[in-house]
Amino acid sequence: MGKMTLKLYVFLFLGLFSMGAKCQEVALKSNLLYDVFATLNAGVEVGLADRWTLDVSANYNGWTLSHDRKWKHWLLQPEARYWFCDRWAGHFVGAHALAGQYNVGNLDNNLSFLGTDFSRLSDKRYQGWFAGLGLVYGHSWILNKHWNLEALFGFGWIYTRYDVYPCAHCGTKVAEDKPHNYIGPTKAAINLVYTF
């Protein structure tokens, strides 16, 4: 998860910035919800047509939290958006893909949602990869000429394969290459957006 992820971010941003940017053709964004949870994140959105944009966001959290809690992950999430009015203003719908890797565990909770028992994260560690698809609805509010505030929620499906460890730092696997299908929220954001 280290150098390869950083190279991916650099390549993504350099590639998108090398495209000639005209007025209201490119937006940079940060998801304030991820910021609250100490997850580095950035997004770039590029205008494709009058009402179509392509948004690509990337997230990274490589830290072990207090009390040996782990929420380590990286995630890449491209999304095609259709805007009902103008780009970067008003309501939009979209379809996204997502993929990444994770290393999570020692997170005390009693959550169970649509067939996924998150309480298992309380006393075991899970490490694996995931890929999925989802749909999103959102709204963007214009704050001034260059700044917007955007809120969105996505729902979809994720397929994952993972290894299970008995504790946060244990190296002995309890289970290996287990599959799981998740259906539920796949994206939530309150983005601070700067448009060019």
Image: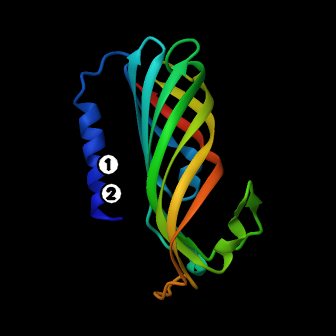
Mark 1 Cα shell of 10 Å, populated few (<14), some (14-19), many (≥20): some
Foreground of the two, 75 or 120: 120
Residue at image point 74% right, 54% down: 114
Q: Are marks 1 and 2 in contact (CB under 8 Å)?
A: yes
Q: Is residue 74 visible?
A: no
Picture layout, residue 147 above or below residue 97: above
Counting labels gives 2
Please name the residue shown 59% across and 47% down the image: 157
User: Where does the image place residue 117, in percent across and percent down from the top left?
Assistant: 71, 65
Task: State the mark number for residue 5.
Answer: 2
Viewer-proximal residue, 137 or 62?
137
Secondary structure at numbered mark 1:
helix
Q: Which quarter of the image is occupied by the N terminus?
A: bottom left
Asked if residue 177 shows in the view, the reply is yes
Mark on residue 65? none
Instruction: Name the one closer to the observer, 77 or 146.
Output: 77
What amino acid is labelled 1 in the image? Tyr
The colour style of the image is rainbow
Q: Is residue 69 above or below residue 157?
A: below
The percent position of residue 40, horizontal first and vertical second, equals 45, 54
- The image quadrant of residue 37 is bottom right
Q: Is residue 88 found left or right of 138 in the rendered image?
A: left
Looking at the rendered structure, the kind of residue marked 2 is Thr
Q: What residue is disc 1 on?
A: 9
Provide residue 4's location: percent of width, then percent of height: 28, 59
Crowd band around label 2 with a 10 angstrom C-alpha radius: few (<14), some (14–19), many (20+): some
In the structure shown, which secondary structural element does the residue marked by tag 2 occupy? helix
